[in-house]
Image (spheres, helix red, strand yellow):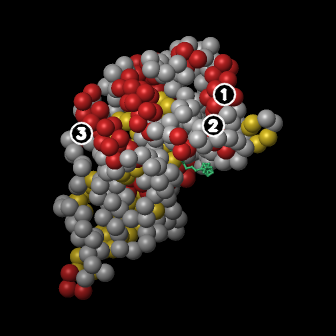
Amino acid sequence: MYDVHKLDWWNEAKFGMFIHWGLYAIPAGRWKGKEVHGIGEWIMYREQIPFKEYSQLAKEFNPVDFDADAWAKLAYDAGMKYIVITAKHHDGFAMFKSYCDPYNIVDATPFKRDPMKELAEACKKYGLKLCFYYSQAQDWAHPHGLNNFWDYDEDKKDFSIYYKEKCEPQLRELLTNYGPIGLIWCDTPMTMAYEYSKKIRDLIAELQPNCLLNSRVGHNFGDYKSMGDNSIPSRSYNMPWETPATLNDTWGYKAGDRKWKPVAQIIRLLVDINSKGGNYLLNVGPDAKGVIPQESADILRQVGQWLKVNEDAIRNTVACPDYPYVLNFGAMTYKPGKLFLHVFNWPDEDHIIHLQMLRPRVTKAYLLADPGKELNYVQTYTPGNMSYRVRIQLPEQPLTPPDTVVCLELDSPLEWAEL
Ligand code: H79
């Protein structure tokens, strides 16, 4: 299942930008004067808005402030290496020029531009992989797509018609018209049968064999595992995996959602996910004008500033073997030869942190923010009484709060001694 070579760029990246953008950015969480509970892109389902009515939003969709270069630059400044954007979400509206279905941004809106074309160019400029989210099973616009039960009789649905008329032709367009695509991000397979997951897998193999596919295509046809939305496993996993996550509580833009996570928490999540071997796919929800909320941009730029200094501790890391104790100073990330200690809780009194049960010998210790200056450390190794201990002397103050990173160079692969 896991093709190591094909996954190289993705394993190295570790951090990507998710973009949820569609017609739902217009209501922005409010419908007919009332606040609608839940994630913004589900508003059509939540309110059971008839397709005839919801589709009228297209006539108003005119994101004149959309600037593909600015979005790509923001991802670049944040230290992200790929962008996954909703080419089509569950509402069925294509955010790209589709030749098989006029319900798309070029043919149905006054905007008339194809933002995916513009993004493909911008991603090339900033060295980012462009990837497409495509809701392959749910489609609330098509009479045979899954989950719109208020317009269409579930008993009369034939998924093969939707697949043949819309799903496959649109995936074909996405894999043909925008240059090399990093990955196709499917979602909520629901009751979709094995044969359709396989068809999607085969379609990618035919058109862009290097393009990855996430596990939500269903039936184990993915190249890597998508964890649940905003869900992080409690332990390390030695397989390719990714957590898609939000900056506030919604994916698609909601004007009323002010629950932004603090920068420190985002860095903490990035480190936690990386330490367990995963990728962090962090979402922004641009508004109906095409602008990424200022709060999102501010958070991402600050994460990027931290990441610039501490990049070695994130990029290309692998799952860190689970430390046998609860760590008090923060978290650890790992790549062969280097163990990174992320100090979130600075030891204000003695400025010393220590690790137990570390089997490899430390050959050098330094802060990523000041790599020219070696840190003093003492490693004691008394296998007779199973004591493996290293104590590291830190400076008085943290250099890159909230997380100052110590790099320990190791003489052998990381192993913890048994407790
Ligand atoms: O694209 C984002 C979400 O729209 C999508 N996955 C991420 C990446 C997603 N699809 N399904 N879900 C998430 C689960 C959604 C469940 C809920 Fe609801 C939607 C809870 C509230 C609204 C439907 C309505 C189910 C319960 C009430």
Q: CA distance from mark 3 to mark 2?
A: 42 Å
Q: Would you place residue 12 above or below residue 329 in this image?
A: above
Residue 91 location (% of width, % of height): 57, 34
What is the number of the mark on residue 300? none
Q: Which residue is mark 2?
A: 151
Query: In the drawing, does residue 87 fall left or right of residue 262?
Result: left
Residue designated by label 1? 52
Residue 273 position, x and y percent, is: 42, 54
Is residue 151 in view from this perspective? yes
What's the amino acid at mark 3?
Answer: Lys
Amino acid on which disc 1 is placed:
Lys
Q: Is residue 407 left or right of residue 262?
A: left
Q: With respect to residue 95, does 362 lie above or below?
A: below
Residue identifier under label 3: 6
Q: Earlier in the sequence, mark 3 or mark 1?
A: 3
Look at the numbered disc 1 and give the secondary structure of its residue.
helix
Identity of the residue drawn at 44% across and 39% down: 159
Which amino acid is tagged 2?
Answer: Asp
**Separation of disc 3 and disc 1 at Cα?**
43 Å
Residue drawn at (20%, 81%) of the image = 383
Q: Is residue 324 above or below residue 45?
A: below
Distance between the alpha carbons at the discs numbered 2 and 1 = 9 Å
Q: Is mark 2 within 8 Å of ligand 1?
A: no
Can residue 77 be seen by looking at this rendering? no
Front position among marks 3 and 1: 1
Q: Nearer the viewer, residue 318 or 140?
A: 140
Residue 68 on image: x %, y %: 50, 21
Instruction: Tell me what residue is drawn at x 53 percent, y 21 percent.
Output: 104
- Name the secondary structure under disc 3: loop
Q: Say whether marks 2 and 1 touch (CB < 8 Å).
A: yes
